[in-house]
Amino acid sequence: MSVESKKTRAACCSKLKLFLASMAFVFFAKAFGGGYMKSSITQIERRFDIPSSLIGVIDGSFEMGNLLVIAFVSYFGAKLHRPRLIGIGCVIMAAGSFLVAMPHFFQGPYKYETSVSHKADVNSTESIMPCLSNHSSSVPHPLAACEKTAGSPMWIYVFLGNMLRGIGETPIMPLGISYLDDFSREENTPFYLACIHAVGILGPMFGYMLGSFLAKIYVDTGFVNLDTITITYKDSRWVGAWWMGFLMTGTVGLLSSIPFFFLPKSLPKQGQEEEQSQSKSTELTTMTEQENFLPEKTQEKPVKFLELAKDFIPSLKTLFRNKIYLLMILTYLVAVNGFIGLITFKPKHIEQVYGQSASKAIFLIGTKQKQCNEQCSCSVKHWDPVCAYNGMTYASPCLAGCQTSTGTGKEMVFHNCTCINEAGAAANTSVVLGQCPRDSDCDRKFKIYMSLSVIGSFISACGATPGYIVLLRSIQPDLKSLALGMQTLIIRTLGGIPPPIYFGALIDRTCLKWGTKQCGGRGACRLYDANAFRLTYMGLIIGFYFIANSLWGYLYYSIVKRQKKTALKNQAKENGQESNAAGNGHASINIADIEDMGTECTI
């Protein structure tokens, strides 16, 4: 092997490794952004005071943006500079993350729903009387002020930004995986995919960790006096600093785009340059996927749209005649419906089912126009929960019949609450701000739930790489990008957009207490029926996964059946060739074996 060929081989290997490392980083970046988006769903819902069904539409906008361009990017992108298109997509994805964070800078400070004034001066000894001050938060707001408050249509920026994230993410999967498979050894592709997914799986973990950390930081930190805030991060009205995370994920996405602008359009097939140098000294180039589609003469000419588009429909027909491919699409579709619903509302599920002990019965007792508070003219729409010593949560100090208060901010305590005496003989008739803490038994159940979630995630992840390999090996080499793109298009359309919407609509039906917007109208849900929430959420997920596992079993049976037919066909060909050589052209073929092979057998 000459020195020049060794240098060429080293350069090609280094570029392939650079592409592999870049793909791993971009998989981390997109998973990091996606994981953080899922972890911020509850914060966004509260900040804009919208129901779960609408937050499902916002979450589904990522898939909407993806499906707008996926078919064109997958087919035409395979003929163009794939690494450069991936880099451009990363820049667009980062711009979308920055746009999602913009409403925070356009809106005024977050004003949470409250039934009494908590703005007493720290040095003041004035005592607030909740029973007589319930009207304080019912003053109508001017229209101009309402446009900047929670519940305003400014959530459209989040919708558009998330859609832009989906558009930018589009070229990463189909173009990146096909590029890697085109220029690496077939036996190395599974290992490379495993490396990429191993790094990518860290993205959601860091995304959720960041979301958990920022959820404990008040949304307007640095803009308001935190001493005047009377709620904690455990309160259902609390909004964390959700916007900071999108600035961070956008920065990471922008950094991930840089390496792709320095990678070539194509590379020699891994290992093929050695064979070429040993057999011939002349320069031979590896046929790339683009050269399989286009005539050799047109490679040096500018690529024309019509020349690329003429084979699009025939390619689609060929692709969708593949039974294994269609079955895999159906299986992924069912599994993704359950998975998207699972990760979208998992934080809300954990919060509502394991986060507090308020049951439906106890809460309803605390919200009734009873004798103990009938003189207070309390509004049942207000949500300013307080906790009594007996573990009962009241929707507001007024509904608890509280007459006086002491302290300021988070340390405020309400006294002489007449409804507590009515619930039972009580020496302590005081309440404190916030919902009552969860039962100790919730901690044990939560640990069991998380343990089962980790085990299920591990088992599910084990099938990711084999699934990609089956998909890549079941289709023609020149249709890999299109196949991956169409798979993404179908799954994002039917498996990514609908689940957050119908999951959210069904979850809204389990709401016990709706919040009230400052400018009127129903806001976000403050409290759910934990049992109904759990049955709705987990029932849908279990149903989808049961169907998906059944389809995986049928897919395995179909693949094994096809492999047996292929083996019989190859054996028949080999037997026919051996018989022709031994009998001077007189073949001895078992007709029964051929008939058993069905219509797929050809001789």
Image (spheres, grey):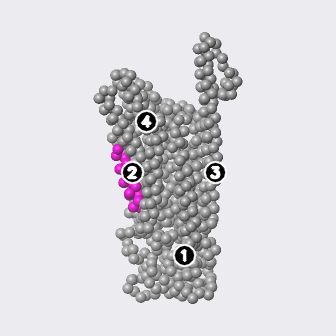
The quadrant of the image that shows the C terminus is top right
Q: Which residue is mark 2?
A: 253
N-terminal of the two: label 4 or label 2? 4
Comparing labels 1 and 2, the label whose residue is closer to the camera:
1
Instruction: Report crowding for label 4: few under 14, some 14 to 19, many 20 or more residues within 10 A (C-alpha).
Output: some
Q: Judge from the rendering whether residue 88 lies leftward or rightward of residue 537; answer left or right.
A: left
Q: Nearer the viewer, residue 603 or 298?
A: 603
Segment tinted magenta in the rendering:
243-259
Measured in 3D between alpha carbons, the distance from the residue under mark 2 to the one under mark 3, in whole angstroms, is 36 Å
Q: Earlier in the sequence, mark 3 or mark 1?
A: 1
Q: Earlier in the sequence, mark 2 or mark 3?
A: 2
Residue 552 visible in image: yes
The x and y percentages for residue 113 are 49, 73
Of tags 4 and 2, the one toward the viewer is 4
The residue nearer to you, when weighing 305 against 294, is 294
Q: Picture quarter containing residue 578?
A: top right
N-terminal label among 4 and 3: 4
